[in-house]
Image (cartoon, helix red, strand yellow):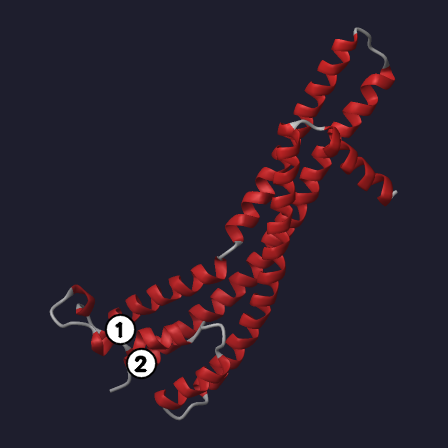
Amino acid sequence: MGGGGSLGLVQTFAQADAAGRAVALLLLAMSVATWVVILWKGWLLRRAARDLQLSTAAFWQAADLDDAQRRLGMFDAQQLVRPLLQAATGLSSAPMHTLAAAGDRSQQLTRVLREALHRVSDRLQYGQVLLASVGSTAPFVGLLGTVWGIYNALGGIGLDGGLRIEQVAGPVGEALVMTAAGLVVAIPAVLSYNVLGRQIARIEADLEGFARDLREWMVHQP
């Protein structure tokens, strides 16, 4: 059955015109991009969750900030915690008499930590837009290929001057393969978007908790 499906895909591609082949190649490119993002982000987020747990534990076990930075250098390979610490400890380098230095220490820490969190979150979210785009557009791309294939099939049958069920069933069945291909591309993209999105949300929540704790700790430092 799998061999027949593969043969149908090959036969559909071989009989398609330039537009039909372009649709098929677009679906193939979308599928390859989707699986590259799935595998890469799955590996990245597993490491990020592990590094975040080790990094935060190492930070709070450090004797001072210098020791904390040294420990983070060993555990924070994904650069999740160090940007927050660097932002918080860089307040003293902000130019005086500027808006960046306005407000009390708590307000300044809140501002710089929020900016650092946004930068880290952007890196964690990288690739999610592609998965969402593929999941929402691939079925329509496949449907476009089906409609175009049926149009060409019916046009060819009309030129023959006759209409029999066997003349319609074969070309239309082959054109419907494009709809199935669009769904095959879209379903993994949608599922992975949801699964990876939940993992990212958990990591972001842990980072926000660490940022709040770091701000409270640094506010009370001399």
Q: Which mark is residue 106?
A: 1
Q: Eyeballing the image, is 53 above or below 62?
A: above
Q: Amino acid at mark 2?
A: Met
**Hey, which quadrant is residue 25 in on the image?**
top right
Q: Is residue 145 left or right of residue 210?
A: right
Q: Is residue 212 visible?
A: no
Residue in the image at 39% along x and 66% along y:
117
Neighbours of disc 1 within 10 Å: few (<14), some (14-19), many (20+)? few
Which of the pair 18/172 is nearer the observer?
Answer: 18
Check the picture and name the quadrant holding the N terminus. top right
The x and y percentages for residue 69 are: 39, 84
Residue in the image at 46% along x and 89% along y:
61
Q: Is residue 128 left or right of residue 13?
A: left
- Secondary structure at badge 1 equals helix
Neighbours of disc 2 within 10 Å: few (<14), some (14-19), many (20+)? some
Which of the pair 179/50 is nearer the observer?
Answer: 179
Q: Which mark is residue 218?
A: 2
Check the picture and name the quadrant holding the C terminus. bottom left
The x and y percentages for residue 95 are: 16, 72
**Hey, which quadrant is residue 176 in on the image?**
top right
Q: Amino acid at mark 1?
A: Ser
